[in-house]
Image: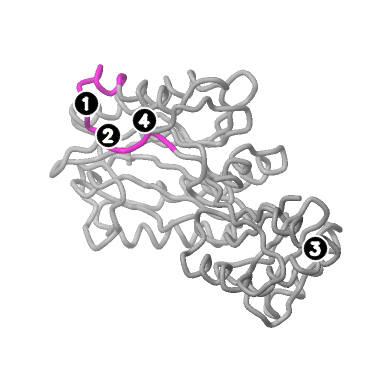
Amino acid sequence: MRTFFVRDTSNITWLTAFDDVFDDESAHALLVTPHDAVLHTDSRYSEAARAAAVAEGVIAVDDTRIAHAAFVANAFAARHAQQPAAEADAVVLGIEDSMTLAGYRALEDAFADAPARPRLRETSDFILDLRAVKDSNEIARMKAAQAITDAAFAHIIEYMRPGMTERAVQIELEDFMLRHGAEGLAFSSIVATGANGASPHAIPGQTVLEAGQCVVLDFGVRAHGYCSDMTRTVFLGDPSPRLRAAYEAIRSANEQVEAALRPGVTGKAMHELAEQVLAEHGFAGKMGHGLGHGVGIDIHEQPVLSPRNENPLVTGNVVTVEPGVYLAGEFGMRLEDCGVLTSDGFEVFTQSTHDLVIL
């Protein structure tokens, strides 16, 4: 018999399929066996969890006031009470590689005096790899989240103008998303103008938007339990030839990769294709980050489009495609879509235009 002990909240959310139960508190543990599953939580969440469990019909909820490690030891003992100790000792208890060292030591201590102990076996991205393939329900949720994000882009390009600060634009952008269906933000939105755009994870501040610059807008929401993610670069007035050339490069890289994406290609190959296109346009070595990442319950999931991923992509993978050009002290720009690999290609969720947006 094999059992699995789960502490990561996003993994628990995915395994239980409980909506509107969990938040950012790491107050939950899930024990999964071949025969049952039990969620250990506390009184803040137990009522909502039990209501969700009734709807799902397969998961028990335990809010006994003990540590998660003690809960696992007790549950293990109850399930193997009639088993000879030698057989119980042969059971493997799978654990996530994201478990803290303190959590691991607590498990060891909880089982130290138990009559039978499982063998603890660390797994590497076991549940994350399962989460990497989205089903039709998950894809529908992500499309709905993306629709909020596309609407926010349409709004913000009507709102923003030279003289505003990055921070003012960020506040308006995030307020719109929260007022139009977002349960929360997928991440803190990026609004970066001029030379600030050369930092891919720039933090919006008091820098003023000026005519002649480009502005990078990278944002997403959490809605229906899933994330969206997109980036657009807009121009404050007619862009210079240099800015136009850079935008043509990232657009070409984005669109060539999206045309090439299909089951069987690797994340590494897609990244290298984007780098090749950027180089052909005169911007070799100016991206500096991986081409894309998986999206789902979390904003960063498996698989990645980067040199480190030599595994074939499969139908149901949801990934971003976000080539960028960054010139320190001058400008930066990025064009990002999110979509899903289908049996014969790549379906883009993002509906906002790739055409130059000049304000």
Q: CA distance from mark 1 to mark 3?
A: 62 Å
Q: Which mark is residue 307?
A: 4
Disc 4 versus disc 2: distance between alpha carbons? Answer: 13 Å
Disc 2 from disc 1: Cα separation: 8 Å
**Left or right: 297 as drawn, with respect to 333:** right
Q: Nearer the viewer, mark 3 or mark 2?
A: 3
Position of residue 11 measured from the top left corner of the image (x, y, whole percent): 61, 54
Q: Residue furthest bottom?
A: 65
Left or right of residue 106: residue 206: left
Residue 283's tag is: 1
Residue 142: quadrant of the picture: top right
In the image, residue 320 sits, relative to residue 148, either above or below, namely above
Please tell me the numbered disc located at residue 357: none
Disc 4 secondary structure class: loop
Q: Quadrant of residue 134?
A: top right
Q: Residue 75 versus residue 303: which sits nearer the camera?
A: 75
The residues tagged by marks 4 and 1 sit, at their Cα atoms, a distance apart of 18 Å
Q: Is residue 136 above or below residue 89?
A: above
Query: For the residue marked with disc 3, what is the amino acid?
Result: His
Q: What residue is shown with label 2?
A: 287
Label 1: which secondary element: loop
Please report the residue visible at 51 percent of the width from the left and 22 percent of the height from the top. Answer: 261
How far apart marks 3 and 2 lie (CA) works out to: 55 Å
Vertical arrangement, residue 255 with respect to residue 298, above or below:
above
Q: Which residues are magenta?
A: 276-292
Give the crowd class for mark 1: few <14, some 14-19, many >=20 residues within 10 Å.
many
Residue hosting label 3: 80
Is there a contact, CB below 8 Å, between mark 2 and mark 1?
yes
Q: Residue at x 42, y 24 (%)?
A: 270
Measure how far apart labels 3 and 4 are at the Cα level: 46 Å
Q: Earlier in the sequence, mark 1 or mark 3?
A: 3
Label 2 packing within 10 angstroms: few (<14), some (14-19), many (20+) = many
